[in-house]
Every structure is written in C-alpha cells, then in structure tokens.
Image (spheres, rainbow, N blue to C red):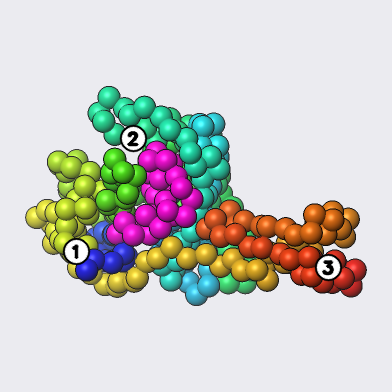
Amino acid sequence: MQHDELLIGTMLEGKARWVAVRTTDTVEEARRRHGMSPVATAALGRLMTGTLILASSLKGDESITLRLLGDGPLQGVVAVGNAQGEVRGYVQEPLVDLPLKDSGKLDVGSAVGLGELAVSRSLQNGEVYTGMVPMVSGEIAEDLVHYLLTSEQIPSAMLLGVLVEKDYHVAGAAGLLIQPLPGATEGDIQAIESLLGQLGVGISELVAQSQSIEEMLDQLMGQLPYHVLERRMVEFSCNCSKERLSDTLISIGKKEIANLITDGKAEMVCHFCNEHYQFTLDELEELWGRCGME
C-alpha cells in the first residue's frame, strides 16, 4: 500500500537539487476534517504540499507558515509544516464552490484571488522571520516560485497538483521542486525547463496513476538521471490540545470566562484540524480561578 512521503535528491550530475512529495492521504485527511469543497481542497492541498517542500530544508523543531492573503472567495488559506513531515492547515471559507475552467480544471486562481503571500519561519531560537510578496496568479506554485526568487534569490521550478474526484475524494496530490545549484549551466536550466514542459498530464494525475512515488519520479524525470539522498514520511498532524486551548481561554480574561460560566459550558474548535473541545461548568470555573492567579 502506498503512503505519503517526501524524497530529497540531486540530478544533472549534482548540478540541481529536487524535492518530491506525495500528499494524497494528507490532503484527503484535511478535506475530511474541514468538509471542504473541491476547489477549497485543491487550494489547501497545493499550499500544504508546497509548505512541506519548503519545510524540508528546516532544522530540528523549526517550522514554516504559509499564508495566502488573497481577495478571492476563499478569503485566505493557511498551512504550517515542519522538517519532520508534519503539516496542517485550513481555508477561511471551506465551502466555496466555483465553475470549472474551460479546461475542465478547478479554478484555484479565482478562488484564491490576488493579494499577498506571507511566509513565516519559526527558528530554533524562538525568532520568527516573515517575508511577504505579491501573488502573481493565485495558482500557488507560481506564487511560491516568485517568493523564492524575489525573497531568497533562488531560481526554482515547481509543480503542485491535487486531483479531486466527483465524490470530493482526493485521488492524487503531489509536488515537485527543482532548483539549479551553483555550477549549473544555461543548458542544465534549459533541460529542467524542457523536462517540465513536456509533461502530458498533471502531477496529480501522475501520482494517482503511479504505484509508488518512485514510479511518479521516473515519469517526471524522463530520461534525466536522478539520485535519492533522503526520504521522510509525511502526514497531517496538529499540535492542538485541550490544555493549549485552556490557555487561550485564560488569555481572554475573567469577564469573558464568567459569561461562558453563565452559559454553563463552552466549546472551542481548532482552526487547523477542526477538532472540537468541550469545557464543562466545573472546568470553566477552574479556568476562571486560574485567571485570577495570573
């Protein structure tokens, strides 16, 4: 049975690096948790996949957060990932539905709209660095390539795709990043561009048809030899907990908690995984008491 994983390697005799990831099950888990429409699933799936690719270069417990702050009906898409292959995310308006494009593809660009892409890196020392660039299409892969070039001066080629069936089930989701390294010639770069330009089907269709991520890579790389240096498991994972949300409740203050006590109970929902947490009257009264000690 296939499972989601991320592979890192080199190609063109070490003159380029690549990162490939299968995220089919991960994106399906996000779709199931959030009850998303197909176009919302495609948008969040692409962003989560891109987040995993960018997070693959992080160290230790560092993480990266990508925010699409577009003017489309989705009203924002957010994903957080780390180097351990864990990713989570949400769409502000998960039920948005749009007509298909003339090509029959989901209209992710219109759903996301144009605006800004914000990329925040949380480092091991606790510092957070955020860079923002204008989105160029809302299709996400092009926007991430634009970010890498303008903010980090790294020329890149990226494919991101999510294939959603008529029953809303995710049949395939994957991503590929290729970056020339110092020493790469113009001919090497042209070989990469030619490689990506000759694909007859999208990367999501390829991964859906492949029995393994290696089979997908063979189709993507064509005649160009490549080497796998590292592989990691990938999964949808959220770090929320009742304790974390208790701290959030305490932070809103005694007055607000008192209002919840009047209601006799409270429910909090995690944006990222849609997990519901119930707080009883006794628990709220305990939090009210802890709030007084802060």
Q: Nearer the viewer, residue 50 or 193?
A: 50
Q: Nearer the viewer, mark 3 or mark 2?
A: 3
Does the magenta run of residues contain 27? yes
| Element class at badge 1 | loop
Q: Nearer the viewer, residue 245 or 9?
A: 245
Q: Position of residue 286 (x, y in %)?
A: 82, 71
Does the magenta run of residues contain 183? no
Q: Position of residue 228 (x, y in %)?
A: 23, 69
> How many other residues sit within 10 Å of disc 1, few (<14), some (14-19) or many (≥20)?
some
Label 3 or label 2, whichever comes before in sequence order: 2
Q: Which residues are magenta?
A: 22-46
Q: Position of residue 44 (x, y in %)?
A: 44, 47
| Residue 235 left/right relative to 118 | left
Q: Position of residue 26 (x, y in %)?
A: 38, 59
Instruction: Say which residue label 1 marks.
Output: 212
Cα–Cα span, label 1 and label 2: 25 Å
Q: Residue furthest left?
A: 223
Cα–Cα span, label 3 and label 2: 48 Å
Q: Nearer the viewer, residue 9 or 165?
A: 165
Task: Tell whether label 2 touches label 3 (CB within 8 Å).
Answer: no
Q: Nearer the viewer, mark 1 or mark 3?
A: 3
Instruction: Say which residue label 3 marks.
Output: 285
Instruction: Say which residue label 2 marks.
Output: 106
Identify the residue at image location x=59%, y=66%: 240
> How many other residues sit within 10 Å of disc 2, few (<14), some (14-19) or many (≥20)?
many
Identify the residue at image location x=74%, y=66%: 280
Name above or below for residue 69 compared with residue 185: above
Name above or below for residue 35 compared with residue 216: above
